[in-house]
Image (cartoon, helix red, strand yellow):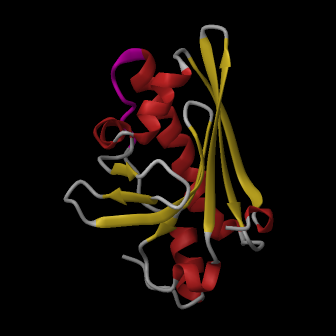
Amino acid sequence: MNLDRFKPLIVYTIYIASTPEKVWQALTSAEFSRKYFFGNSVEIDLKVGGAYIVRTADGNLHISGEVAECVPNRRLSFTFNVNWPELIEKLGATLVTYEIEPLGNAVRLTMTESHDRPLDDDILSGGRQGWPAILSSLKSLLETGEPLVVRMAPPERMLTALKKLGIRTP
């Protein structure tokens, strides 16, 4: 997979009072991810070319992709394709990268969402709303044992922009 074609459009950095090993486990464990990722479970075959899958609470496929880089406890990159018809065809693939850096008694976690083409801010509003909530819940869970419960739906402006492109959404 040629990663050079992807350009970052969303970048978030958070600091977590935890260890790289615990953050890695949280990002790659189906059971743990269910607690902070809105009930969704992340299933990853942790090798380059391995499957990246996110299932909804009822077990349906929500997101699929492929692992592009895997350095345990340090870096994980994968394609991230929401299971909506025509999305990848019209918007291209999304590449998500987690970088885990130890900083004394904390970890700096940087999440980057990259795309192979420029995208409208309305379309990016979904990720810009979702990622901070997911990462904040992950941080809360690792630091306190309780996830941050955030109730939200996809932004209306994103759904409207996708519909204008002819992309069917739920």
Residue at x 60%, y 8% (from the top left corner)? 105
Where 93 sits versus 39, above or below?
A: below
- Is 168 one of the magenta-colored residues? no
In this rendering, the answer to whether 160 lies above or below 2 is: below
Magenta stretch encompasses residue 148: yes
Q: Is residue 162 above or below residue 97?
A: below
Q: Residue sitting at 32 percent across and 44 percent down? A: 30
Task: Tell me residue 129's x, y (percent).
Answer: 56, 51
Look at the magenta stretch and give its main secondary structure. Answer: loop
In magenta, the rendered stretch is: 144-150
- Of 63 and 135, nearer the camera is 63
Residue placed furthest toward the bottom: 166
Residue 155 appears in the rendering: no
Q: For residue 160, which quarter of the picture?
A: bottom right
Q: Quadrant of the C terminus?
A: bottom left
Q: Residue at x 28, y 39 (%)?
A: 31
| Residue at the extreme top | 105
Q: Quadrant of the N terminus?
A: bottom right
> Residue 71, located in which quarter of the rendered image?
top right
Q: Position of residue 90 (x, y in %)?
A: 61, 85
Is 4 on the left or on the right of 153, as rendered?
A: right
Q: Position of residue 161 (x, y in %)?
A: 60, 78
Outermost residue toward the left? 58
Seen from the viewer's position, the closer of residues 160 and 115 is: 115
* Residue displayed at 46% across by 47% down: 46
